[in-house]
Each structure stands twice: as C-alpha cells, then as structure tokens.
C-alpha cells in the first residue's frame, strides 16, 4: 500500500513503463492465470431531463425542453429484450436528476422488469439516489432499501467525477457533494449491496485532488469492502460548457498513468477497468498491461459520453480479440464479476 505522497510522486514521474510494470505486478497477484474479463450489458438512459446543469455534461435537457424525454415501461422493456437476445446479463440504467420521478416510479419500473426478465439491475448513481430521496421526502437509507426490495441489485459509481468539493463546486455545483456521494455508497454497503466506484479526470483538477479522490475510495473500501471495481475515465469536452475552459483532453499517456496508479493505490479493490469508451480499443488494450483486468462492456447503447464527443464502438468479438492479442484469456463476466461463462 502506497501513501498519498508516493502516489503524487508517481503522477509527477515520467517513468510510464516503470509505473505500468508496478501496476501489472499487482494485477498478476490479484488475478493469477492471465484472465481478462468483459460483460455484455446495455446502458439505458431512462430520462435526460435534469435540474443540475453540470458543465461537463452534453446529455441533459432542462425540465420542459422539447428535446427532453422520459422512457415509458414498454420502451425500456424492448431495450432489455434486445439485450437478453444477444446474451446480455445486466442493464446499467442511469438518467438525469428528474424531480418529477418519485420513488414509486422506480419501484413500479423495477418490479415490472423483474417480473418479465431474469437480469441484473445495476442502476441509479449516487446523485440520482439523493435526488429520489429528497423529492420523495425520505432518507437515503430508506430509498436504497425500498429500491432493493423492488429489484435493484447494485449501484454504479457514476456521479463521483472528482471527490473534492472545490472541484465539484466548479463543475457540478448543484449536484451531490462529496459527503453525500460517500453516504450513498456506505449506506448501500451497510445494507449488503455491492457498488462500483469511478473517477472522471482531466476536468481541470490538480494531481493532489486526484490523489484525494483515490484516498476517499480506498478508505471506504477499507471500512466496508463493498466496491466490486474501480473505473477511471477521461473527461470528454465536445459540446460541453466546461470544454470552453479545459482546452485539451487528457492524453492516452495520462490515461494509462492514472489507470496504473489507481491499480497500485487501490490494492484493496479487486477489479480495475480499462476504458475503451473514451480511449478507444487500442489504448484500452494497452491498459491490460497497466493494471487493468477488465475491458468493460460491449455497451449496446451509450448516450451520455457520446454526447460529449466519444464515438468509439465495440462488439463482443472486438473485446475478445484485443484481450487475446494482449496475451490474456477472455472471459465473459456478470455485473458482480462472476466469470462462470464458458468461453
């Protein structure tokens, strides 16, 4: 386990290969057998109405906007059926913070999905959970418990961005603060639910703030053990108001270095995902030698990051090919990282 000062030294170092080798050694220790995983699932963005106006987001539409939408049950059922038809095992459902949708709306939806499909529901980021709780007049704990009872299986780590309130005030001042994000995940873990953790970097944060984010995640995991995976990804600036101030996106070198340092720092989280959605397949493949043991999802549908300029695509065979060509054995997994699929 390295210290925050040591992590800062790594960020400032130009020894990219050495940092990658250190991360790869930890990956080999945690995942012997040279297996790299992927999942077949789908992003379903059930609404794009949002009241938060985050400066890094090109997906949301203000309440009442003519381009805004909230999907009905039948549209969501169709998307899930298409996922099941290609061997999908889960859906990642996230949307804008829409105050018109109280907890009963989500309970009805999740129960209806579970009545029709045997599929893992990995849904609702921490900001959505806090919004539902506030708009429904109930606590975060009651919100999560009721959603679990209705069929919610796990919570994604979205909405973390950088877990430092100075950064959050600059890029997403209306959204949940650091302590509220932490509370959602700690509460979920206390209720027996697994979650993931993410980091969106390259949005003008300092290296110290990036390390602070990693420390917050590491401490939660030390206390609860509830995170299944950590997923770092880069801010995409196209079509965003923040893009006017952040003139250059994080480079591939910066992505690989941050991925590797994340693997070294978060040695108490079993899985670290290397991203193709923002970086493309070639950099994603390199990430398997910089600490990553998972390449994420085929993502049949993705609307949020693509709205900000990321237009990479991948089929299951694409993911299996880059895994094999990097010297790994590809294995399909489920949302909780069980690799019981024959490949």
Image: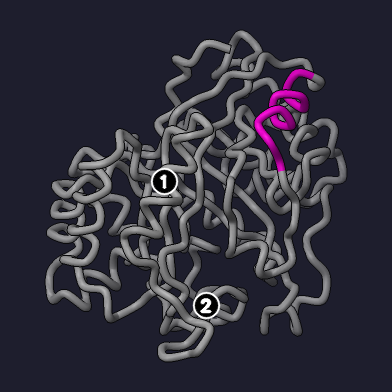
Please report whichever mark, 1 or 2, sits nearer to the chain's N-terminal start: 2
Tell me the number on the disc at residue 80: 1
The residue nearer to you, when weighing 234 against 128, is 128
Query: Could you tell me residue 105's position as x and y percent?
Result: 21, 66
CA separation in Å, label 1 and label 2: 22 Å
Badge 2 crowding class, 10 Å Cα cut-off, few under 14, some 14 to 19, many 20 or more, is many
Which element carries disc 1, helix, strand or loop? helix
Check disc 2 and report the residue beneath it. 60
Residue at the spot 20% in from the left edge and 63% down from the top edge: 140
Q: Is residue 116 visible?
A: yes
Relative height, residue 168 to residue 181 (above, below): below
Residue at the spot 68% in from the left edge and 50% down from the top edge: 277
Residue at the spot 58% in from the left edge and 30% down from the top edge: 38
Which element carries disc 2, helix, strand or loop? loop
The residue nearer to you, when weighing 121 against 190, is 121
Q: Is residue 23 visible?
A: no
Query: Could you tell me residue 70's position as x and y percent?
Result: 39, 72
Count the numbered circles shown: 2
Q: Relative to residue 143, is residue 299 drawn left or right?
A: right
Q: Main secondary structure of the magenta part?
A: helix
Query: Could you tell me residue 64's position as x and y percent?
Result: 42, 91
Relative height, residue 18 to residue 82 (above, below): above
Magenta stretch: residue 274 in it? no
Query: Could you tell me residue 160's position as x and y percent?
Result: 48, 61
Report the span colored magenta.
Answer: 314-324
Relative height, residue 174 to residue 208 (above, below): below
Tell me the number on the disc at residue 117: none
Where's the N terminus, which quadrant? top right
Q: Relative to residue 251, is residue 176 drawn left or right?
A: left
Residue at the spot 33% in from the left edge and 38% down from the top edge: 226
């Amino acid at each position: 386990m390295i210290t925050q000062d040591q992590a800062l030294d790594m960020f400032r170092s130009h020894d990219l290969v050495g940092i990658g080798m250190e991360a790869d050694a930890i990956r080999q220790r945690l995942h012997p057998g040279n297996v790299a995983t992927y999942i077949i699932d789908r992003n379903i963005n059930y609404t794009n109405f949002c009241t938060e106006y985050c400066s890094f987001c090109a997906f949301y539409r203000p309440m009442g906007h003519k381009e805004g939408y909230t999907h009905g049950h039948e549209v969501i059922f169709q998307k899930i059926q298409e996922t099941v038809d290609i061997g999908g095992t889960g859906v990642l459902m996230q949307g804008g913070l829409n105050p018109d949708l109280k907890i009963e709306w989500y309970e009805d939806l999740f129960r209806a999905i579970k009545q029709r499909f045997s599929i893992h529901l990995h849904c609702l980021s921490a900001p959505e959970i806090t919004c539902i709780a506030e708009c429904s007049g109930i606590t975060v704990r009651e919100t999560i418990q009721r959603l679990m009872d209705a069929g919610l299986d796990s919570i994604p780590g979205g909405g973390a961005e950088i877990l430092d309130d100075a950064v959050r005030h600059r890029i997403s001042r209306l959204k949940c603060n650091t302590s509220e994000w932490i509370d959602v995940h700690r509460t979920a873990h206390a209720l027996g639910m697994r979650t993931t953790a993410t980091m969106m970097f390259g949005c003008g944060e300092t290296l110290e703030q990036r390390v602070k984010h990693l420390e917050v995640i590491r401490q939660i995991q030390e206390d609860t053990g509830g995170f299944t995976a950590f997923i770092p990804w880069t801010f995409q600036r196209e079509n965003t108001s923040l893009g006017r101030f952040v003139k250059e996106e994080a480079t591939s070198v910066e992505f690989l270095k941050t991925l590797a340092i994340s693997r070294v720092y978060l040695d108490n989280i079993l899985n670290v995902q290397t991203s193709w959605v923002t970086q493309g397949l070639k950099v994603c493949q390199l990430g398997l030698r910089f600490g990553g043991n998972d390449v994420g999802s085929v993502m049949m549908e993705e609307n949020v990051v693509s709205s900000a300029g990321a237009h990479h695509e991948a089929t299951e065979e694409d993911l299996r090919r880059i895994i094999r060509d990097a010297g790994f054995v590809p294995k399909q997994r489920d949302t909780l990282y069980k690799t019981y699929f024959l490949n």
